Every structure is written in C-alpha cells, then in structure tokens.
Amino acid sequence: MPVLPHVIGLDIGGANLKSASNRGTTHDQYFPLWKHPEQLTEALAKLLRAHHSQDGPASALALTMTGELADSFDNRSEGVRSILASVKHASDQLRCQNPPTTPPVYVYTIHGQPNAPSSFRWQSVETVIQSPLTAAASNWHCLATWIAARSGNDEEFQLLLDIGSTTTDVVPLAHQKVASASVTDLDRLRSGELVYTGIRRSPVCAVLQSVNIDNATIPLMAENFATSDDAYLALKLTDERPEDTDTADGRPRTHNAAMQRLSKMLGEDLETLGSEWVTLIAKQVVAAQSTAIARAIRQVVNTHGSPEHQLPDATVPVVVSGHGGPLWQRAIKEINCSARTTLGDWKVEVKSDLAT
C-alpha cells in the first residue's frame, strides 16, 4: 500500500496555535500572539519539531489563520504577512533536523464570486504575500469545506455549528460545499454566520449589559472583571483547572475564583453579594449566549435553506464541532432537537416551534 505524503496542518489564531498531522498527531498550545509576536517563529518551530520527531519529515505544511487581527499588527495585511514569514522561518529550521527537510507551505485562501458561494484555493506563500487579505480569517471556511465534503448527501442542506473560546461560526452547507457567499468577517457578522460569543474568553459585559434579579433590572459594570468561562465554572458546567491562570484577574480557573470574579460585575464581592445572586448572574450569561446563537441559526437557515427547511417548522441537520458542548446544547434546546453522531462530532437535528 502506498504511503501518503506527511502533511501537517497549522492554524494560527490570536490566542492559540493548533497543529494536526495526517498521521494522527495533534498539538494545541496557548499562545497570546498580541503579546509576543516576536516569539511566534520559535513557538511554531517547536510544534514542527515535535511532529518531525513523532511522525518523521513533513512533505508539506497547510496553513489557516485568524491571528492577523491581533493588536500587535497595524492592520490585517501586515498581520498576514508577519504570520507567513514566521511559518516560513519555522519551516526553514527543519533543515537542522535529522533527516533534514524544508516542506513547502500552502495557504488556504477565500475568494468571492458574484451572486455565488465563496470558493477556496491552496496557494503558495509568495502568491499570498501579494494578496494577503485572501488568507485572513480563513479557518472557518477550511473546516466547513472539509465537513461539507464528508457529510450528508449531495442534495442535503445542513449547518456547521463551531463554538470556540471567543466566537461561534454558523455556516450553511449544501451540495457538499460551503453555501455561504461570505468572504470576510464583516460579511459573516452581517449575515449571522459569525456570532462573537464563545465558551471561554467573551467578557461578561459584552454578553449582556444588565441582569434581572430580585424583581429589578440591574446594569452590569462595563469592566472586564469576568468572562464567559467564569459563568460555566460557577455553574460547574466545565472542569476546574487550578494551574490555569489565564483569567480576567490572573487568578486560578476554579469554581470559587470564578464566583468571586462574577460578583465584581455588580461592584461587590462574593462575601457581600452571596452565592445565590452570583449563580443567577452566571445563568443569565449562559442564557444570553445561547439565545444569540439560536437567533443566528434561525437567520442563517431562513436565508439559505430551501422552503422545506424554513424555521420554525422545519428540521435541519447540524454538525457540531469545537469545545462548546455546554453552550451548543442550550442553544439547540431553544429551537428543539434530537441528536445523533457523525464524523466523530455531534450531528443534531434542529426542529423549532418558536417564532423567528
């Protein structure tokens, strides 16, 4: 049996570096690009060396990105070019490995078409440097293209729901291709295909501006005292990690610390506000996120679905990915569902009896 070329996929975000080999090896590393852009080359080289030692020399690197929006860059074009340079330099360092190798880098790019779904191309670094924005914010389209080609039949309309630490993608799929005409994040924000809310990093004050407690509507403080992660920790919907201090106040990711952070949203602390009120804040954060995602699902389905797929009466298959289990389950419940698995992810049939 012929041996497939060894390809390593890289996804460079603003806060995480992810890599996966077609030989089964994966790595996921927290990397705040906006703080340390000068360290990106070495961080990538370390990932590539790990793949090299585990799976042997790479034949090619396949790259997607969203990190070009990091604060360390003056604009997105500069961000794309800087990331491309770091990947190229990291790849060049593999010459020092045994056996030496310098795999070519192929970049996933998105291209708009008049009155038609957007398309993609894998292009060389040299080509993308000339048109850098074609590679900006490309990972959603790459994932959706992969899912579409491997799930459903040629006629089936379905959604990809991908919930991450900061954002949620709601991507329409049809005829085993991406059905969205969107190219940029602005396009997707306008169409409901990008919801800027996620399971970990969304500031609570960006998720909702007030809470309803004790028969009163109370405004929240517009400070980054707590994030969505604290709501899930407070409700014990996610596991504690005391060694992780990537939180709003730099203190551990624990239930008690999360309760303390949430209490500050009303200018109090856990001792003075009490756990009952803090729990109510957490529940309303989760509810606001799930409602926003459910609203986006309705918008995307009713824009792209055929008449038999229109909500609130239709059933629409949804392929779920990412790490937002507690959130997608609640969002789906707002429009009713039954669940089954496919491709190792959850595939959910959405059926709504709610008004759009």
Image (spheres, rainbow, N blue to C red):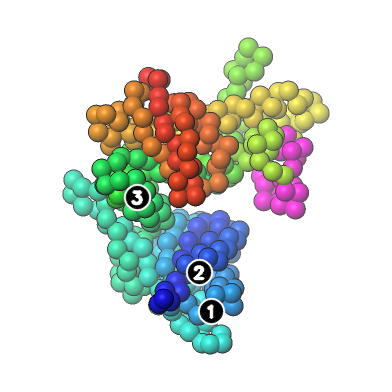
Is 251 in the magenta? yes
Does label 3 or label 2 sit earlier along the sequence?
2
Q: Which residues are magenta?
A: 241-259
- The residues bearing labels 3 and 1 have C-alpha atoms spaced at a distance of 30 Å
Identify which residue, 203 or 110, lies in the foreground.
110
Alpha carbon separation for disc pair 2 and 1? 10 Å
| Residue 65 drawn at (x, y percent) | 44, 60
In depth, the one of 222 and 337 nearer the eye is: 337
Q: Secondary structure at mark 1?
A: loop
Circle 3: residue type: Ala
| Amino acid type, label 2 | Arg
Residue 152 counted in the magenta span: no
- Give the residue number, with chain letter if any, for mark 2: 23
C-beta proximity under 8 Å, tags 2 and 1:
yes
Magenta residues, dominant SS class = loop
Residue at x 45% of width, y 50% of height: 343
Q: In the rendered structure, which disc, 2 or 1, sits on the residue that comes first in sequence?
A: 2
Q: Which is nearer the eye, 158 or 32?
A: 158
- Residue position for label 3: 148
Outermost residue on the left side: it is 114
